[in-house]
Image (spheres, rainbow, N blue to C red):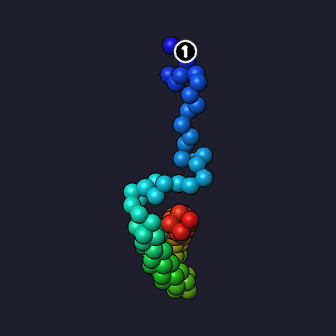
Amino acid sequence: PGPSSLPVDEPPEPSIASNDTIPESALSGGPRVRIISRAEEHRQRARNAEARRDYLIKERKDALAQARYTDAFVLNCEIKGLEEEIKKLHKKAERRFFLGKS
């Protein structure tokens, strides 16, 4: 046999990325309602993380005002971590909303 195991006259199957639509099971294995429900869960988790971030920002401000620089530094690291998590959650939600509604 040659370098490829596919017969010469059969083209390879297209990947999911080359299809115009992605099957519903591509993300959650369920119907569109499940995809949208999961998107809403991601949005809620992002909102909770945003509330926690806002609280930590206030705590960091208080720590700086009280010259607790080590505490402020630790809080700043936590805030940055939360901001990354928030971005990821919103991106996941956006993708699922798009797939669930298209």
Residue type at numbered disc 1: Gly
Identity of the residue furthest to the front in this view: 9
The relative height of residue 4 versus residue 23 in the rendered view (above or below) is: above
Q: Position of residue 44 (x, y in %)?
A: 45, 77
Element assignment for label 1: loop
The residue sitting at 50% across, 22% down in the picture is: 5
The residue sitting at 39% across, 57% down in the picture is: 29
Q: Which is nearer the eye, 67 or 52?
A: 52
- The reply to whether residue 11 is in sight is yes
Q: Position of residue 9 (x, y in %)?
A: 58, 24
In this rendering, the count of numbered labels is 1
Identity of the residue furthest to the top in this view: 1
Q: Position of residue 84 (x, y in %)?
A: 54, 65
For the C terminus, the quadrant is bottom right
- The reply to whether residue 91 is in sight is no
The relative height of residue 68 versus residue 17 in the rendered view (above or below) is: below
The relative height of residue 85 versus residue 29 in the rendered view (above or below) is: below
The relative height of residue 34 versus residue 54 in the rendered view (above or below) is: above
**For mark 1, what is the residue?**
2
Q: Position of residue 3 (x, y in %)?
A: 55, 18
